[in-house]
Image (cartoon, rainbow, N blue to C red):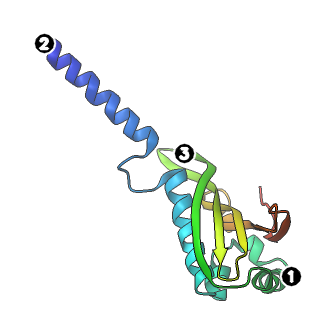
Amino acid sequence: MKKAISLVIFIFLLSTIVGFTNCGGDGSGIDGEGKKKSRELMTYLENKDDEGLKSMFCEITLSLDDFDEQVERFWEFFGGEIVSYKIGAVGGQSKSRDGKVALLDVIPRIENIETESGETFRIFFHCYVSNDDAPNKVGITKLTLRTGDDLNLIYTIGEYVD
């Protein structure tokens, strides 16, 4: 009897830990979605895919009067072939309603982006993965690129949309 109770408690604790850490899951959730969006973004940057990059932004950011110019200047600021990078930490929030995710936003960081010219960059971006109350916010709202000796040179596309 004690073995059966111990086994039930062990299985319950294990499933709780796996559920909270998203281990063995499908990669949904804040960390998984943030890393997925980071890999997608880096694919577009590695391929210098202007349309792919633009497709990641939300409708609100896409509608900015100078959005195309911001993207054009971004490419000038972020020159060179990417030789390596590291997908870093992901922050964000998730809210459920009626048993399903109603809001999921992520704030990933991509670090140590090295180019063949020896430049180092870091990218942060804010992205709504889902937003049932405001579907026009789904996508990247703001992308920030940092470079320079102390990563003190900054270039931004878009603006934070709350």
- Looking at the image, which residue is at 82% across and 84% down? 73
Disc 3 is placed on an element classified as strand
Query: Residue 65 at what x, y percent from top left?
Result: 86, 81
Query: Residue 11 at what x, y percent from top left?
Result: 26, 30
Query: Residue 121 at what x, y percent from top left?
Result: 72, 69
Instruction: Find disc 3 in the rendering and name its residue.
Output: 96
Instruction: Find disc 1 in the rendering and name its residue.
Output: 66
Image side of residue 134 versus residue 9, left or right: right
Q: In this view, does 88 lie above or below 51?
A: above
Task: Give yes or no for contact between labels 3 and 2 (Cβ–Cβ under 8 Å).
Answer: no
The residue under label 3 is which amino acid type?
A: Ser
Measure the C-alpha gap from mark 3 to mark 1. Answer: 35 Å
Image side of residue 106 versus residue 62, left or right: left
Disc 1 is placed on an element classified as loop
The residue under label 1 is which amino acid type?
A: Asp
The residue under label 2 is which amino acid type?
A: Met
Q: Can residue 123 be seen in this view?
A: yes
Disc 2 is placed on an element classified as loop
Quarter of the figure with the N terminus: top left
Furthest residue toward top: 2
Residue 83, quarter of picture: bottom right
For disc 2, the neighbor class at 10 Å (few under 14, some 14 to 19, many from 20) is: few
Earlier in the chain: of badge 3 and badge 2, it is 2
Q: In this view, does 12 lie above or below 57?
A: above
